[in-house]
Image: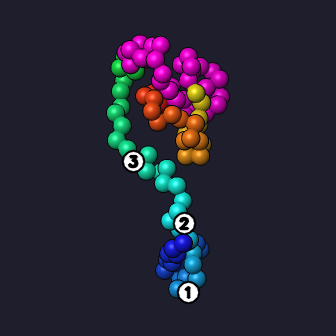
Amino acid sequence: MCSHTSAFDVQGDIADPNKDLLTIDREAPTRWKQFFTPVTSIDTHQAKAMMDEKRGQEMTILDVRQPNEYKASRLPGAKLIPLPDLGDRLAEIDPQKPTLIY
């Protein structure tokens, strides 16, 4: 384990330099790096073409909206993982399959 101390504590007061404010576990999974992988943005016509092209093949359609939006309407076969939950639920997404996120 490695510790990092800041000059200021949470309230903005000068912190005790001998007090650890943040502890970083260097052994923790680095799943957050996946969020910095370059992605391609596409429009709705390109998304439909991709879905038509992949029809019958393995593909993940990921809906990151809120549950009430998902209930109101969704793409057929879409998996709901609301954006605030995505970091905790990355294991549910197969990295080997193409993924369409909306």
Residue 78 showing in the rendered view = yes
Query: Contact, CB < 8 Å: mark 2 with mark 3?
Result: no
- On the image, the x and y values in percent for residue 60 come to 50, 26
Is residue 42 inside the magenta stretch? no
Residue 48 showing in the rendered view = no
Residue 18 disc label: 1
Please say if 98 is above or below 53: below
Is residue 50 inside the magenta stretch? yes
Residue 25 disc label: 2
Q: Which of 59 and 21 is in front in this view?
A: 59
**Precedes in sequence: disc 1 or disc 3:** 1
Q: Tell me the crowding category of disc 2: few under 14, some 14 to 19, or many 20 or more residues within 10 angstroms, Cα based.
A: few
Q: Nearer the viewer, residue 1 or 74?
A: 1
Q: What stretch is highlighted in magenta?
A: 49-78
Of the 4 image quadrants, the one containing the N terminus is: bottom right
Cα distance between the residues tagged 2 and 1: 19 Å
Residue 67 disc label: none
Query: Residue at left 46%, top 17%?
Result: 57
> Which is closer to the viewer, label 2 or label 3?
2
Query: Residue at left 48%, top 22%?
Result: 58
User: Is 70 placed left or right of 51 in the picture?
Assistant: right
Q: Tell me the crowding category of disc 1: few under 14, some 14 to 19, or many 20 or more residues within 10 angstroms, Cα based.
A: few
**Precedes in sequence: disc 2 or disc 3:** 2
Residue 36 disc label: 3
Q: Nearer the viewer, residue 77 or 70?
A: 77
* Residue type of the residue flagged with mark 1: Asn
